Amino acid sequence: MSVSIRLLARTCAIAGVLTMVGCSTQPQAPQRPAPVIEKPAVTKPAEPVVVQPQPGVVPTPATPPVQALNPAALSLARQAHSQYLQQDYQGAIATAERGLRIERRAADLYLVLAQAYAQLGLSQKADMFAQQGLRFAPQGSEVAEKLLRVREFVGN
């Protein structure tokens, strides 16, 4: 009889646990519709203002902004240029490469590299650096003109 009492107690315990679990779940709330967001009223834009040119005034063309070099890169560009003028082409290349690690868009540094490689007879490298420099040099600037001359010098 003690086995049947244990079995009855165990069954009652399981039934009690299942009852509590069933009671602890909450029914799902009915889904609410999404809120309606009203769009603001569209207003008609104002009429554009037309400015008439004044006689005798010639507009100046917009010039591309010249990128200011990081002071460290500017110092290295001056040093590399000085080394190039002293015909220390390897030193100019090393200094210009250090400058490019600081300022990747410095057309002046690409110019020094292109000129130095041209002087060393490495025309492919000179042309490659001249092309890269032209990407960053303002169109029509002195640096751009010199980069184009290097390309002509090496045959491209």
Image: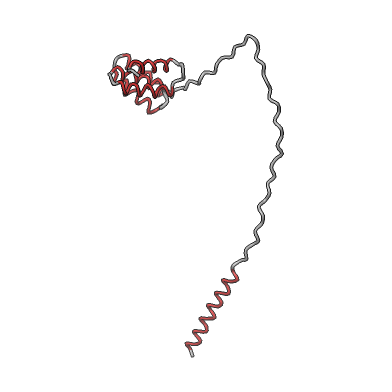
Question: Does residue 76 show up?
Answer: no
User: Going by the picture, which residue comes out furthest to the bottom?
Assistant: 1
Placement of 151 over or under 23, stated as above or below: above
The residue at 49%/90% (across/down) is 1
User: Going by the picture, which residue comes out furthest to the front?
Assistant: 156
Left or right for 142, reference 116: right
User: Going by the picture, which residue comes out furthest to the top?
Assistant: 56
Q: Position of residue 149 (x, y in %)?
A: 37, 15
Q: Position of residue 92 (x, y in %)?
A: 32, 20
Q: Position of residue 59 (x, y in %)?
A: 59, 14
Q: How is the image coloured?
A: secondary structure
Left or right for 43, reference 88: right
Foreground residue among 83 and 41: 41
Placement of 11 over or under 85, stated as above or below: below
Query: Where is residue 25, by image quadrant?
Result: bottom right
The residue at 70%/40% (across/down) is 40
The residue at 30%/20% (across/down) is 123
Q: How many marks?
A: 0
| Quadrant, the C terminus | top left
Left or right for 57, reference 145: right
Q: Position of residue 8 (x, y in %)?
A: 52, 84
Foreground residue among 82 and 148: 148
Foreground residue among 94 and 41: 41
Query: Where is residue 50, by image quadrant?
Result: top right
Question: Does residue 121 show up?
Answer: yes
